Amino acid sequence: MRTDPITLQVLRNHCRAAAESMATTLYRTAHSTFVKETEDFTVQFLDAHGKTCAVPLDLGATWYPGVDYEAAIGLVPGGYAPGDIAMTNDPYSGYLATHSPDTNMWKPVFHKGRIIAFAGGHIHNVDVGGAVPASLSRTLTEVHQEGIRVPPSKLYQEGVLDEKLLRVILANVRVPDQNWGDLKALIAAVNTGERRILDLVRRFGVETLVDGMADLLDYGEAQARAVLTGLLDGDYAFADYCDEDGPDGDPLRLKLTLRIMGDSAVLDFTGTDPQTLSSMNVPTGGHARHSLVMVGVYYVLSALSPKIMLNFGTTRPFTCILPEGSVVNPQHPAAVGMRSLTCARLRSLVFGAFVQAVPERLPAAPAGSSSIINISGENRRTGRRSIVAVAPIVGGGGGMPHRDGTDGSGADAAYLKNSPIEITESEAPVRVLRYGLMPDSGGAGAHRGGLATVLEFTTDAPDAVVTARNRDRSVFQPWGTLGGRPGAASTFALNPGTPEERNLGNTDLFNLPPGAVVRIVSPGGGGRGDPRTRAAEAVLVDVRSGRLTVAAAARDYGVVIRDAQVDAQATAGLRATQPARGNQRFDFGPARLAHERVWTEQAYLALHESLAKLPVSWRARAKKSVFAALRASPDTPPAAVIARLLG
């Protein structure tokens, strides 16, 4: 270390405070509900190479504490001068922006003609043009349909706004005033970051600051290595599924082998399905520590070491193997707008691998699906067409080693804040009919999974369009662990409880007639531990609070409740008849068990070996033909179908 420990700890706190000042500026000046209420934004304090040194812990999204700006910074033509602010939202230019609605911005901080740091961050624009309102849908097949893309470019050059670039951007989006308002908030944030970094120069001196930033990265690395050293060496394989690889598609399989070796680890995604024909691809460019792939690791490290410092250094002990042409490393021009759906499953994948390494310290699966509802339509109050995020519908956390999972907004999606109904109804042409927790949705366990969220709304707009991105977990449930049961699957219905009720499944784009009602229920979190070992009084509390029905108490926990009290004798008798679940490592639910009776590990291995021989552009189509042929001949072994079609 170049910095003494006391000074380094003081500097660490100051760098975090600088990042929090940036976040507060952005949060308080943003225009769109999705940024100012839901908080889908980030800010980063970066070193001179674009490596993240510090992030806020209480504001914004939690995906990017280890993000690396270096490649994108180097793609801006002409170098940098004081007053420059650069931006990009192109997911294939430096692999910094991860889909077109996310606009990243960075500003170099100069001291005596030398760049000593950068202030950076991103916002999620509700719409950046493209084929559909809000720009995102699984129905899109190439990145060109997902809105305007700006490669790394200077929005400000030596303090002067590039009006031509701004006009091009705003001419290609559906709500330009809203986009420009959010962009100005991000500009204000990076300007705040520049001021705070120069304040640190005055307080500590430039060399102490520069050396301290390098030491913070080394310190983050050392802390991560210390966590890995405490884990048992070995290979831990795990697979998980998205319900579909596209509209009405086939299951999308993600495979991970976690290899822990002393103070380092490899995350090998070999065996993951090929890039899709939809927009569910995750643009990483094969980066060995890409932040989208590392999100689950950040959460695991934080769970195992709650005071760990998260920055780019934290990622150094890890190496990701991301096969080219797979869904985690697609080739241009694959669509990537719905990468957040697949990223939710990537987090479940990482959790499942680490749970095998430290089962006593990690929870069951979180809901793993955060449906974000946007509505485009005429607002009668203003007379103008608007595109507004109604709410993120986030499910519960998985049962913890020491308590139940968090209800409604747990674990890896808790950063998405709910929007107050009053604000939603004032800005969007909707009326919210119900918003709360869904009883009986948390996976049963000694520690119950967190409950799902339910939202019902209607509209009076004549031509409203709803986009519901990230729809998943309608088929494959969040897994329970150590004897716990899986969380309830998600549901999505139009006009529920009426003769016109229609199951929307994982639909993410549809027209909503005036007066029609939409109900969306997120998944619940998985349970942890045998439900029969849960204290009967804890089950009673859940029933009295409305989290659990009397019928579910008996069915899932063996607890008989009569007249709002536990019937101890009947409970003992019922529990005696229920089979012990022991320490069953995972309970994936019936849909996955049925799928894997046909699609075994050996069948998937044969499929991927055959697909690897084909050009990347043919692999998803070939997979689709194999699944279709197997549905037509369900009694034929997959290996025979694969051999016949792919030879």
Image (cartoon, rainbow, N blue to C red):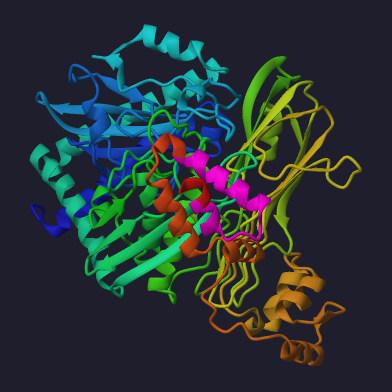
**Could you say which is closer to the camera, residue 10 or residue 496?**
496
**Could you say which is closer to the camera, residue 414 or residue 100?**
100
| Residue in the picture at 71% in, 78% down | 557
Question: Magenta residues: mostly which secondary structure?
Answer: helix
Q: Is 343 placed above or below 106 here?
A: below
Res 71 → quadrant: top left
Segment tinted magenta in the rendering: 619-643
Q: Is 53 placed above or below 1 here?
A: above
Residue 262 spot, x, y in % from top left: 22, 70
Query: Which quadrant is home to the N terminus?
Result: bottom left
Residue at the limit of the structure toward the top, as seen here: 164
Residue 81 spot, x, y in % from top left: 18, 18
Q: Is 533 placed above or below 18 here?
A: below
For the question of whether residue 56 can be seen, the reply is no
- Verify whether residue 169 appears in magenta: no
Q: Is 440 positioned to the left or the right of 254 in the image?
A: right
- Verify whether residue 623 appears in magenta: yes
| Residue in the picture at 23% in, 58% down | 317
| Residue in the picture at 57% in, 63% down | 596
